[in-house]
Amino acid sequence: MTKEKKIKLIIILTVLVDIIGFGIVIPLLPFYVGKFSSSPLAVTWMMMAYSLCSFLSAPLLGKLSDRYGRRPVLIVSILSTAIGWFIFAFGQALWVLFLGRIIDGLAAGNITTALSSMSDISKDEKERSANMGLVGALFGLGFVIGPLLGGFLSLISTKFVFICVGIMALINVISVYFMMPETNNKKFEGKMEYHPLSPIMSAIRDKRLRNLYVIFYILFVGIVCYQSIFALYLAKVFNYGQAQVSWMIAIIGLLILINQAFLLKNFWFKFFKPKFLRVWSILFYAISLIFFAINNQKVFFVALIVSTFLQSVLRAILMSYITGKAEETRRGEAVGILSSVESLSMITGPLIVGPIYMWHYSYSFYLSAILIFIAFIGMYKYSKLETETEII
């Protein structure tokens, strides 16, 4: 086994354990928080608190990984996850639960640092996209295994579930410490600002990538909008219960796994050029969401399959494209900014879609489709301008 393949295997196992832990707690989190507060806002604000902290910390962690290396940042980040879940598990008041999620969010660089490592060992854009897609496949696998494992562990107690997730994170820390070598061989030597918002300001000043960050943000606000009301929609329109919603999430995870692990390399990259995918996939994605609003279960399932495939392709290819355009010594910062932009979308998306959903549930999908269509226009114009520049 070559050094690159060994590093890739270690990254894969690290990310998989992290995502399985995330998949375990997601279905159980609202019920556990419900023991401390009957208000649905408690869960909503807790998720937003984590997203806000992640928004502030992710670019900074990416920048630190460019300066000091991926390995130490990854160790600290996973350790904060372990500490956060232990605090969450043993907390006896709602504010302690908030503290646990905030601690995790303030060093939420597990996945972004792993993606930076994947980018480090990639030789070209095609391989980088495939590696990003592989991480996407791990999300699918984690969201298949996680909920099933969480349901089994919850038979003992919900508290025991969060303790187990904390232990998994500790094991992950130990494995990274002893097994993972440093992948960043071209560390950033320039002057660095350590204010949490400095990378965001750098992104605004970066004329080459600024428009891509804006497109990425609009796209993911559209994604988060419909994902925020997904379970509510299933319950309202199709009368789904908790078990049925959990199985639906597992099916989505399985689709992502199939797409990222097999179809990305053997179908999408085989028959389509990366430029075509990063532009026109956004348009077809927007169109697929319109069919969600049709109150027909068969149409809904077809639209779900199409949109899941397109979203997982877009996530891999856009992250690869944007990080590939960043300076080689600042790719960790670029990945961190993308994660921060995604976190920002997870804050703004629910705020936008809530009133729309209360107006009429189907309008939420139209809103998402419109936002994603705007992202398509932006990417189409950007790619056209890029082609014209290359010709000149």
Image (tube, helix red, strand yellow):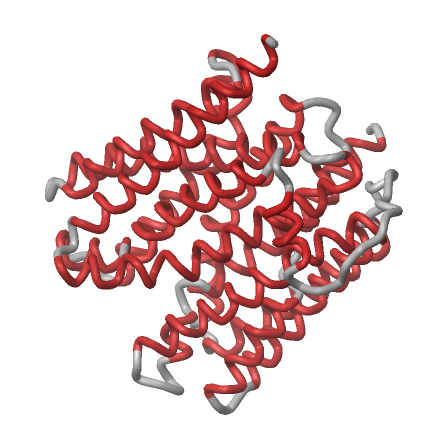
- The residue at the point 51 percent across, 44 percent down is 141
What is the x, y in percent for residue 191? 84, 52
Compared to 353, does 126 lie above or below? Answer: above
What is the x, y in percent for residue 223? 37, 46
Count of residue discs: 0
Which quarter shows the N terminus?
Answer: top right
What is the x, y in percent for residue 237? 13, 53
Q: Residue furthest top?
A: 391
Depth order, front residue of 346/122: 346
- The residue at the point 66 percent across, 65 percent down is 107
Depth order, front residue of 364/176: 364
Compared to 119, does 343 lie above or below? Answer: below
Task: Using residue 104 as the reference point, say whether residue 113 is left or right of it.
Answer: right
Which quarter shows the C terminus?
Answer: top right
Res. 12 in view: no
The quarter of the displayed image where residue 79 is located: bottom right
Res. 342 in view: yes
Q: Residue furthest bottom?
A: 92
Task: Using residue 262 as the reference point, say whether residue 305 is left or right of it.
Answer: left
Depth order, front residue of 157/114: 114
- The residue at the point 46 percent across, 76 percent down is 158
The quarter of the displayed image where residue 345 is located: bottom left
Task: Using residue 77 as the reference point, say whether residue 163 is left or right of it.
Answer: left
Compared to 88, does 151 lie above or below? Answer: above
Compared to 382, does 300 lie above or below? Answer: below
Task: Using residue 54 as the reference point, say whether residue 128 is left or right of it.
Answer: right
What is the x, y in percent for residue 321? 59, 30
